[in-house]
Amino acid sequence: MEEKGFTLIELMLVVIIIGVLSAMVVPRLVGRSEQARVAAARADIEANLSIALDLFELDNGTYPSSLAGLFTEPSPAPPNWNGPYLKRKPADPWGEEYKYKFPGERNKGSYDLWSYGRDRVAGGGDDIANWEEAE
């Protein structure tokens, strides 16, 4: 009478194969979540928030004094405020508020918009902004 099932050697081979595959794949995935956060912050700064700010400026002739003017009506309200331009208060992928300054110090005649990145420290090397750093 022959019994059906896996031997200990067969089970060990399967575990070893899974281990080898994991050792090859896991290092490639490490750091991808941080890259995704940086890409999301860049998309917010270069597209999503910029479009909302430009729409506000198009309607009112100037940019808002703070990002709050994009999702709540400022007081006193600009004459042509057609918001909300954003559904909610914008936060970067690390849970911090985006930084905004109008008029901009780096972008003369426009606005500065940035995130301090993962380290949440100004100038920490991972800041994401709407201006080019001088080399």
Image: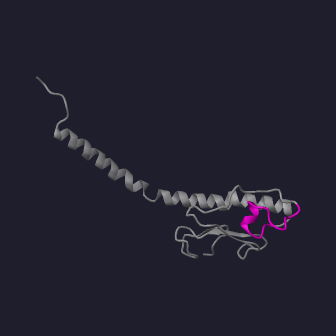
- Please tell me in which quadrant of the rendered image residue 95 appears: bottom right
- Please tell me in which quadrant of the rendered image residue 51 appears: bottom right
Q: Report the colour scheme.
A: one colour
* Nearer to the camera, 94 or 109: 94
Q: Residue at x 29, y 49 (%)?
A: 19
Q: Which residue is farthest top?
A: 1
* Nearer to the camera, 2 or 77: 77
The question of residue 127 being in magenta is answered with no
The part of the chain drawn in magenta is 63-79
* Nearer to the camera, 2 or 29: 2
Q: Quadrant of the C terminus?
A: bottom right
Q: Is residue 105 left or right of residue 117?
A: right
Q: Residue at x 85, y 63 (%)?
A: 60
Q: Residue at x 57, y 76 (%)?
A: 123
Image spot of residue 10 (x, y percent): 20, 38
Q: Quadrant of the N terminus?
A: top left
- Please tell me in which quadrant of the rendered image residue 131 appears: bottom right
Image spot of residue 93 (x, y percent): 57, 61
The question of residue 70 being in magenta is answered with yes
Image spot of residue 100 (x, y percent): 69, 70
Q: Main secondary structure of the magenta part?
A: loop
